[in-house]
Amino acid sequence: MDKLTKYRTLIKRILSDLAALVNRQPTPGVETLCIFDDERGHYVLLDLGWSEDQRVQNTMVYVRINNGKFWIEEDWTEEGITKDLLKAGVPNEDIVLAFQHPEMRPLTDFAVA
């Protein structure tokens, strides 16, 4: 299996597992969804629905696979999916904390771009 296929499979598994975990104790009227776009490399975990009289549309995780690296654009999970990626064997240099300002990225242990 090539690296890109491996990375696509990995991020879909991680997000699907997170969705299953969240959906064990669902918020009434709110659904946690996974959206996968392999062709363009976009992977999203979001909450969508209604809670009481309020519209819920919350992106919990948004990851892109760009130039053979995971670009973490948004991550509101408790421990962060970076931990899951590292645990699965993804090297630090293949993870970009894109939610960090580009000037701050060199101060992390991860790729700058």
Image: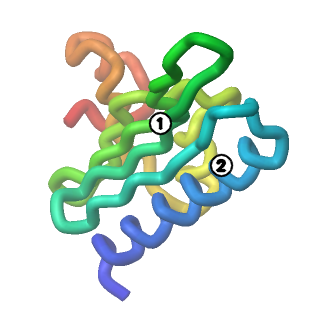
Residue at point 33%, 37% (across, down) = 96
Residue at point 66%, 57% (across, down) = 17
Residue under pointer 1: 61
The image shows residue 57 at horizontal and vertical percentages of 46, 25
Going by the numbered disc 2, the residue's amino acid type is Leu
Residue at point 48%, 63% (across, down) = 12
The image shows residue 95 at horizontal and vertical percentages of 37, 44
How far apart are the alpha carbons under marks 1 and 2?
Answer: 10 Å
- Residue 76 position by quadrant: top right
Local crowd size for mark 1, using a 10 Å CA cut-off: few (<14), some (14–19), many (≥20): many
The image shows residue 27 at horizontal and vertical percentages of 74, 31
SS state under label 1: strand
Disc assigned to residue 11: none
- Residue 3 position by quadrant: bottom left
Q: Residue furthest bottom?
A: 1
Residue 46 in the image: above or below residue 68: above
Q: Are marks 1 and 2 in contact (CB under 8 Å)?
A: yes
Residue 23 vs residue 28, the one in the foreground? 28
Residue 29 in the image: above or below residue 92: above
Assign the C terminus to one quadrant of the image: top left
Residue under pointer 2: 18
Q: Is residue 97 left or right of residue 37?
A: right
Whether residue 106 can be seen here:
yes
Whether residue 93 can be seen here:
no
Precedes in sequence: disc 1 or disc 2? 2
Q: Is residue 77 left or right of residue 36?
A: right
